[in-house]
Structures are given as C-alpha cells and as structure tokens.
Image (cartoon, rainbow, N blue to C red):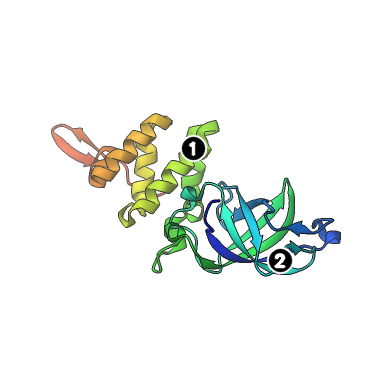
Amino acid sequence: MKPTDFIAELEFLPSEKSGRKSPAHSGYRPHIEFENYPEYLTSGQQVYIGQHTAEPGTKVNAEITILGAEYFAKRIYENMAFTFCEGANTIGFGKVLEIINPDLRCTADADQKSINLNLYAEDIKHKLRADFGEKYPEAFRSMQRFIISDNAFQNPRIIRAVIYLANKNILQLEKTIQQARTDWRDILLWAEYQEENGQTIQVRDFTNEF
C-alpha cells in the first residue's frame, strides 16, 4: 500500500446539498481538486482516523494518499483547501492538517503567487492557450514544473520569453525550458534583442504583457 501523503479534515456535504446518499467507507477514493490547481485533478484515498465510515453531513479526519503525488511536489501546505467529488458532483471539502510526505511540502517562504502559474498575469495563461491549443494542458504543466524548480525562473519576463521562443511548438517549448535552465540570460537575449547594422538592439520588452 502506498504511504500516506497528508492528514486532512474532511467535511462531507449533506445528502440534500448534493452530498452522498450513503456513508463513505474507509478506503473511499473520490477525485480531488486542490485550491488554485484546477488542471491537476487527481484522486485521493481516504482512510478515516478512529472510525470506519463517514456519514453525509459530518466532519472527519483522514489519512489521504493521492494518485500522481509527483505532480504536487513542493506545492502542498498546511491549511490548503481542496474539494472532493464524484464525477461533476462535489461531495465535500477538505483542509490539509499535516503533511506526511516531505516531497509535497511547500517551502515555508514560498509565495503561492510565485510558484503557481494559475496566479500569474492573465496574459501569460491566455498566450499559452492561444499558442498551444489542445496541447495547452501539457504546455501548462511544463511551465509549472519550470517555475517551481528554481526561484530565478519565477519572473514573468523570463516566462514570457520562454513562451515566445517556443513558437507554438510543444517540443520547442521543452527545448527552450532546458536552455533556460542552463542560462536564463540567453533566453532574454534571444527573445528581446536582435542584430541590426552590427549593433544589438532591444526590439521587445517582456516585462510588459504580450
């Protein structure tokens, strides 16, 4: 059995408010959507602490084991909110009480507005959607991994430059990200400057929106 990832407080909606019609038993595995991470829908097994079932309309504490924990590396923090659901129906709400899996723990000084691409300027997300179309989820995840890997990459100017140089190609996006990891200054040089009459001049400024 996979180890527990975190302990959470769970609040099950009552049946009359779209909650379950019957109790959930320990081992129940609904879908989970974390606050501000709608693109990372996962499932989480609930093992109830001190009891075997959870009635609709009640609160319980539970050990939670999520599927695809690697996607949430360094992003989970105490008191982080989430919803759990069955299909399109929200069954209840949760709050992280204690993180057991150290790989998931967000660093104490991390600013969610810096490590969560969903909270960046709208022009960045709009450009990703417009450029990558059906590949948008893959492009978004690649950029999310990029910004969380190093504080230096949590700069909207660098992010815009990477997206620009990717030129609407998902493979080029991955290549550009790797180049940025080597030296992000090259990315700014290639994206914002060009040679004219033997001089290097700035023709774009990605401190501004697309």
Q: Is label 1 in a helix, a strand or a loop?
A: helix
**Residue drawn at the location 38% of the way across and 45% of the way down:** 160
Q: Is residue 111 left or right of residue 192?
A: right
Q: Kindly report the distance in space between the C-alpha atoms of the residues bearing marks 2 and 1.
A: 32 Å
Q: How many marks?
A: 2
Tell me the number on the disc at residue 138.
1
Choose the circle earlier in sequence order: 2 or 1: 2
What amino acid is found at the position of numbered circle 1 in the picture?
A: Glu
Q: Which residue is at the front of the view, 74 or 188?
A: 74
What amino acid is found at the position of numbered circle 2 in the picture?
A: Glu
x%, y% of residue 100? 49, 63
Q: Residues within 10 Å of mark 2 (few under 14, many from 20)?
A: many
Q: Is residue 175 left or right of residue 185?
A: right
Question: Vertically, is 158 above or below 59?
Answer: above
x%, y% of residue 64? 59, 59
Pointer 2: what residue?
11
Quarter of the image where the C terminus is located: top left
x%, y% of residue 98? 53, 68
Q: Which residue is at the front of the view, 108 or 21?
A: 21
Question: Vertically, is 190 above or below 60?
Answer: above
Q: Residues within 10 Å of mark 1 (few under 14, many from 20)?
A: few
Residue furthest to the left in view is 198
* Residue 210 appears in the rendering: no
